[in-house]
Image (tube, helix red, strand yellow):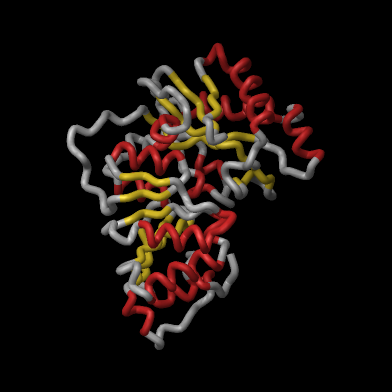
Amino acid sequence: MPQTSMLAHLLSKADVSYVDLPLEALVCEQHHLSSVPDYPIAAIAASEDGLDVGSAYWLRADPVHLVLQRDSFSLSEPCPLPVLREHAEAIMASLNQHFEQDGLKFCLGDSGAWYVCLAQPPQIKTALPAMAMGKNIAHYMPQGVEAGHWVAYLNEVQMLLHGHAANVARELVGDVVINSVWLSGGGVMPAPQTTKPAVAFDCMIGSHVFYQGLARRSGVVCQPGVAYQKVSLSLQDTISQFTKQSNVRLQLTQEMLLEESTFQVLLNALKTKKISQLVIHLACYEQTLVAKINPIDLYKFWRKSKPMSAYLL
């Protein structure tokens, strides 16, 4: 992300605060979901991802690349890694053949996301990948009564991935190898709510299956995400389409976050008061930056722009 950008300009006009939760955890809390001991992200996502979640326990099993540091391994971005479907299917077949006797079933969602399904809840607590990014993963491995078993499973996964035909093919085209999976977001599908929960918005716009699942569970209107190919035009159309909605949540993809036109469109919408208040939630590893901007704030000329590094603690 550039040090000086339209996003940095918007943040300079905003009321900025930080919440001591990763973005995914904060979103769960806003939807009245608790960590017991994980937030049930995997089950909610899998339910929108073409999988029959039933009453099983689900974990995300994101394909990742671990980097060897001087005396430890760290989790590198992006997480999950983009993986061709044919390679993902080949790896899934190997994992399922190996772990069948242990009761672990690896599943591939329609979106390409990886999951592992269990008949019974494991006695572990996992860490969201945002918390471990770029750090010594030893501190973020599964914790709990069965932690030893699950660390052993991960070691076996890493051995299976080493030299796997799918990884050989990735290396041939210059892609980093998938040398592990990252487990997180464990839980069963939350029970249906008898009453519509109070959430801070009445429309969700996003393509990620987790956000779509949250919208369905909360009874909130959900629309497909903005097409990246024409970000500025699509975002302008989206804002115009939903001006009658009182509160809209828009999921920004990584590509949109890096596109200057994304924030130029939001700035213009604030200037013309098509947006009466813009609230940005920006993931900062184990924290979330929350920026609130009203149209009048844009006239606070004394607030000078700062580099993005000043905000990303």
**48 lies above or below 72:** above
Camera-nearest residue between 124 and 89: 89
Q: Residue at x 53, y 15 (%)?
A: 102
Camera-nearest residue between 75 and 143: 75
Which residue is at the far top?
101
Please identify the quadrant where the N terminus is shown.
bottom right
Q: Find residue 89 and report its horizontal and vertical position in percent.
A: 64, 26
**256 lies above or below 306:** above
Which residue is at the far right?
172
Q: Find residue 286 and report its horizontal and vertical position in percent.
A: 45, 53
Residue 104 seen anywhere in this rendered image of the structure = yes
| Residue 12 occupies quadrant | bottom left
Q: Is 254 on the left or on the right of 268, as rendered?
A: right
Q: Is 180 on the left or on the right of 234, as rendered?
A: right
Which residue is at the far left?
195
Count of all numbered marks drawn on residues in the image: 0
Camera-nearest residue between 71 and 277: 277
Q: Is 166 on the left or on the right of 154, as rendered?
A: right
Q: Residue at x 60, y 46 (%)?
A: 75
Q: Residue at x 57, y 25 (%)?
A: 153
Q: Residue at x 59, y 18 (%)?
A: 96
Q: Find residue 166 and report its horizontal and vertical position in percent.
A: 73, 30
**52 lies above or below 221:** above
Camera-nearest residue between 101 and 214: 214
Q: Find residue 45 and report its horizontal and vertical position in percent.
A: 43, 35
Residue 17 seen anywhere in this rendered image of the structure = no
